[in-house]
């Protein structure tokens, strides 16, 4: 129950144990086409360029930046946690010029600040932001931020690594231009693949490039020689078994229904939240911007959170995440992602937290969390 990788469903693991066939085998190519269609559903897009990059979420991030930025171009980046900071690194390495829009960790991106930055930097053509900041458990308003970016004639690069499958994300309806995600968060697949999708505006910008994409491996013009729908040519050996897993995970998402999956994450979050609050603990993030799939809980005064986490792991076989950066030691991060977002996990987590915190003499209410979670689950 950490910030990812999430629990992988047994069906996904079983699919991954199938025999490894060739990456140009007709049966494999048919499966690639299905993966593209299933990803379009998950992203809610009809973008033709919707594929999994053969590497983790960070590679999807890098693919967006290196393909869209040309040397010297200004990119406005909204930063309210770890992943916004990484975007800045990517821009600098792609020889772009980052313009930072900063918000306090634990709060969402302020649309007014983005607007001000775009007014002050009229030559910027790209705005980048993270929809679901896994480092803090904050959700920003991707639709609103994209709307502002488009008013200023900017393309958007959007990190949806933790949102895809777990909370509302509508790529076409919101007009998001270049979007990347990951396999190991709310899709409950193993780590190592990064679904990406690019709309026509983004593809056009890539086609109009004056300079070569600095990364050979992530150059989408080349990647599409393999993933596109024409005659396929060898680019790299696809991670065959990993793609079996992604195919199964996406098929499961379709069986459940995307909206049902979003609702399940929200439902389990509300149950966990009731239990956490009944214990007397509080959330880092204001209710209006909380991510259901990543719960940042403030560590009570006097509790050493490293000890708390290691006791949960050693005594209860339960993994939760630590705070990062300025939040290290101050919060723990409880993931309710994908297959892991279920009532059994919610109850187990509350029980283990209560037992260990009480033993550590933390000032919490005991004997009430499970009931509160159960009641919330019935109500919601
Ligand atoms: C996990 C994560 C990433 C990075 O994904 P990796 O698969 O670890 O490379 C990027 N952005 C966000 C918001 C994430 O949660």
Image: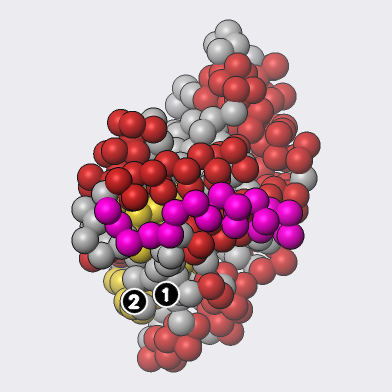
Mark 2 surroundings: few (<14), some (14-19) or many (≥20) residues within 10 A: few
> Could you say which quadrant of the image residue 173 lies in?
bottom right
Visual colour scheme: secondary structure
Mark 1 surroundings: few (<14), some (14-19) or many (≥20) residues within 10 A: many
Spot occupied by residue 23 in the image (x, y as percentages of width and height) = 56, 19
Q: For residue 107, which numbered disc appears in the image?
A: 1
Spot occupied by residue 226 in the image (x, y as percentages of width and height) = 56, 31
- Whether tag 1 and tag 2 are in contact, CB under 8 A, the answer is yes
Specify start and end residues of the magenta stretch as a single range: 361-380
Residue denoted by label 2: 104
Horizontal relation, residue 275 to residue 55: left or right: right
Label 1 vs label 2: CA separation? 6 Å
Horizontal relation, residue 225 to residue 360: left or right: right
> Could you say which quadrant of the image residue 24 lies in?
top right
Look at the image and say whether residue 144 sits in the magenta stretch. Answer: no
Spot occupied by residue 30 in the image (x, y as percentages of width and height) = 72, 24
Point 42% across, 41% down: residue = 352
Confirm whether residue 147 shows in the render: yes
Looking at this rendering, what residue extends furthest in the top direction? 19
Q: Image quadrant for the C terminus? A: bottom right
Point 65% across, 51% down: residue = 374
User: What is the number of callouts on the image?
Assistant: 2
Look at the image and say whether residue 368 sits in the magenta stretch. Answer: yes
Horizontal relation, residue 49 to residue 222: left or right: right
Spot occupied by residue 187 in the image (x, y as percentages of width and height) = 58, 40
Q: Is mark 1 on a helix, strand or loop?
A: loop
Point 56% across, 49% down: residue = 370
Point 41% across, 63% down: residue = 281
Q: For residue 293, which numbered disc appears in the image?
A: none
> Could you say which quadrant of the image residue 379 lies in?
bottom right
**Disc 1 residue lies near ligand 1 with CB under 8 A:** no
């Amino acid at each position: 129950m950490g910030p990812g990788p999430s629990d992988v469903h047994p069906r996904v693991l079983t699919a991954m144990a199938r025999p490894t066939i060739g990456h140009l085998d007709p049966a494999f190519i048919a499966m690639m086409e299905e993966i593209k269609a299933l990803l379009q559903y998950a992203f809610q897009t009809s973008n033709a360029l919707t594929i999994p990059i053969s590497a983790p979420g960070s590679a999807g991030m890098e693919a967006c930046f290196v393909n869209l930025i040309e040397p010297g171009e200004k990119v406005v980046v909204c930063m309210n946690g770890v992943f916004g900071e990484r975007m800045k690194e990517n821009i600098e390495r792609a020889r772009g010029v980052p313009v930072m829009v900063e918000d306090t960790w634990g709060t969402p991106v302020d649309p007014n600040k983005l607007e001000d930055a775009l007014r002050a930097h009229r030559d910027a053509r790209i705005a980048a932001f993270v929809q679901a900041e896994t480092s803090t458990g904050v959700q920003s308003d991707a639709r609103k931020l994209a709307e502002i970016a488009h008013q200023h004639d900017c393309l958007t690069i959007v990190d949806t690594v933790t949102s895809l499958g777990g909370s509302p994300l509508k790529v076409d309806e919101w007009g998001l231009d270049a979007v990347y995600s990951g396999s190991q968060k709310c899709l409950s697949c193993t780590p190592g693949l990064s679904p990406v999708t690019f709309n026509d505006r983004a593809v056009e910008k890539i086609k109009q490039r004056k300079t070569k994409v600095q990364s050979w491996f992530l150059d989408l013009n080349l990647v599409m020689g393999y993933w596109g729908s024409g005659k396929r040519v060898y680019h790299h050996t696809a991670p065959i078994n990993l793609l079996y897993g992604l195919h199964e995970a996406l098929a499961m998402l379709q069986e459940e229904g995307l909206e049902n999956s979003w609702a399940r994450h929200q439902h389990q979050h509300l149950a966990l939240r009731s239990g956490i609050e009944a214990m007397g603990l509080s959330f880092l993030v204001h209710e209006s911007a909380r991510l259901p799939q990543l719960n940042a809980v403030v560590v009570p005064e006097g509790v050493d959170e490293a000890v708390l986490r290691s006791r949960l792991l050693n005594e209860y076989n339960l993994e939760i995440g630590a705070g990062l950066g300025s939040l290290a030691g101050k919060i723990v991060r409880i993931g309710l992602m994908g297959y892991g977002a279920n009532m059994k996990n919610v109850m187990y987590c509350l029980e283990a937290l209560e037992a260990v915190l009480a033993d550590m003499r933390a000032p919490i209410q005991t004997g009430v969390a499970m009931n509160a979670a159960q009641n919330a689950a019935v109500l919601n």
